[in-house]
Image: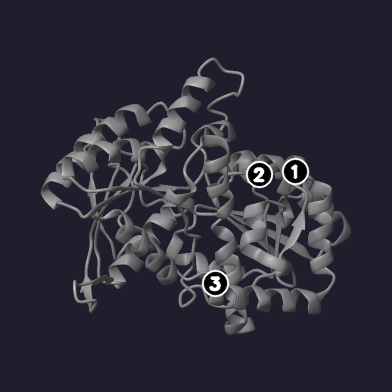
Amino acid sequence: MSIARTGDGSVTNRAYRILKLAPTSFFADYGCHVRIYEEAKALGRLGSDVVICTYPAGRDPEGVRIVRSVGLPGGREIRVGSSGHKLYLDALLSVRGTRAGLRYRPDVVHAHLHEGALIGAAVSRVSGCPLVFDFQGSLTAEMIDHNFLSPTSRVFRPLRWLERTINHLADAIITSSRNAADLLVREFGCSPSRIFPVLDGVDTTVFRPFWELSEQERHLVRSALGVPPGRKVVVYLGLLAEYQGSSHLLYAAEKVLARRADVHFLLMGYPGEARYRALAQQLGISSSVTFTGRVAYERAPRFLAAGDIAVAPKMSATEANGKLLNYMAVGLPTVAFDSPISRDVLGEAGVFAPVGDADRLAQKLLDILDDDVDAAARGRALRQRVEEHFSWDAAARQILDVYRIVIK
């Protein structure tokens, strides 16, 4: 519950009414969806009332209140990233968000993604409350990452202008990394006084260390996932896409498996499963790589506990990398491509390879595979780090501090 001071200086409790705008098919078990979900739950635990306004598609996880925009015939199940479908979905969400703002009368509109901030600017005016923008990466950079936009395209400059305009609409901006905060100041001219880094978190009571499972339990999980017995398991959980480094990961896997036949790669995620399964077959490593497809967020802790090492070859320079925190909470030594975001999260216990270098990624994985003592020490250090620095309740308290600044 938020804390406010009365005129005589005494402390009183106040619960905020928060309208979250999520222009995505919430909930879809990855990335920004996890941040939206966990923020809402943590804010609720601290006494605030949260409503998430989102697209018509998606599933309803427990513990949060959701209102959805109407869908068009045949369009309810569209999965969207950067997509032309977003034009009409955002228009419908704008209508639903405005109605929700008028009925719910929030104390603050908390908008996710740039489309949410653009919609939220109108909703906040109608509702007479401030707008907080939860910035999780550059709009144009994400569109380039998803191959939806080229930097040489004629529409790049107008979109870059639109992104800059949106970045200046909110009363405050929350970023999921310090690197993103620096980006907003450096490339978009945002005032540092309006920017508040609030790093992603993880529920360490749900994502438990793998060593708390017996070897029999881990064997059962591995068997259920199709992992042959007697293997060391490298796990990945997230989207399968080029900007996530999925091809680089498979090229690295080829090199690791050429040196060690006792290793198995467990790649959990979507939507590019068919594409990367074909690449694994082309590389001749399909018998040592298991693709699970989409994994429900609720099952992620147990599936990750089947691993010995985690890998995160994300290529994007602006987006957060929340999967690292899940790996850390499970106590997995983690190899990632080197980026400011990865170093912010993993700290000195992380293992880093140059971005885009499959050879070095393979060598770093082999280094960990070849040294059980170092692997165990890194895993325990990462678990300790996540316990000390990355809880969702701590993140929610920081968000409440931002609300207190902007709510008059």
Instruction: Left or right? Give the position of 130 relative to 397.
Output: left
| Closer to the camera in the image, 132 or 25 | 132
* Disc 2 residue type (three-letter): Met
- The quarter of the picture where the N terminus appears is bottom left
Instruction: Using the image, determine if residue 407 lies above or below residue 380.
Output: above
Can residue 196 be seen by looking at this rendering?
A: yes
Q: Tell me if label 1 and label 2 are in contact, CB under 8 Å.
A: yes
Instruction: Left or right? Give the position of 67 relative to 385.
Output: left
At horizontal 54% and vertical 54% (from top left) the residue drawn is 177
| Closer to the camera in the image, 396 or 82 | 396
Which residue corresponds to mark 3? 389
- First reached walking from the N terminus: tag 3 or tag 2: 2
| Closer to the camera in the image, 403 or 40 | 403
Which residue corresponds to mark 1? 356
Instruction: Left or right? Give the position of 260 relative to 398.
Output: right
Instruction: Using the image, determine if residue 50 lies above or below residue 56.
Output: below
Which residue corresponds to mark 2? 315
Tell me residue 375's x, y (percent).
76, 74
Tell me residue 339's x, y (percent).
68, 51
- First reached walking from the N terminus: tag 1 or tag 2: 2
- The quarter of the picture where the C terminus appears is bottom left
At horizontal 66% and vertical 45% (from top left) the residue drawn is 246
Tell me residue 359's x, y (percent).
84, 48
Near mark 2 (Cα within 10 A), the count class, few <14, some 14-19 or many ≥20, is many
Q: CA gap, disc 1 to disc 2?
A: 7 Å
Tell me the element at label 3: helix
* Disc 1 residue type (three-letter): Gly
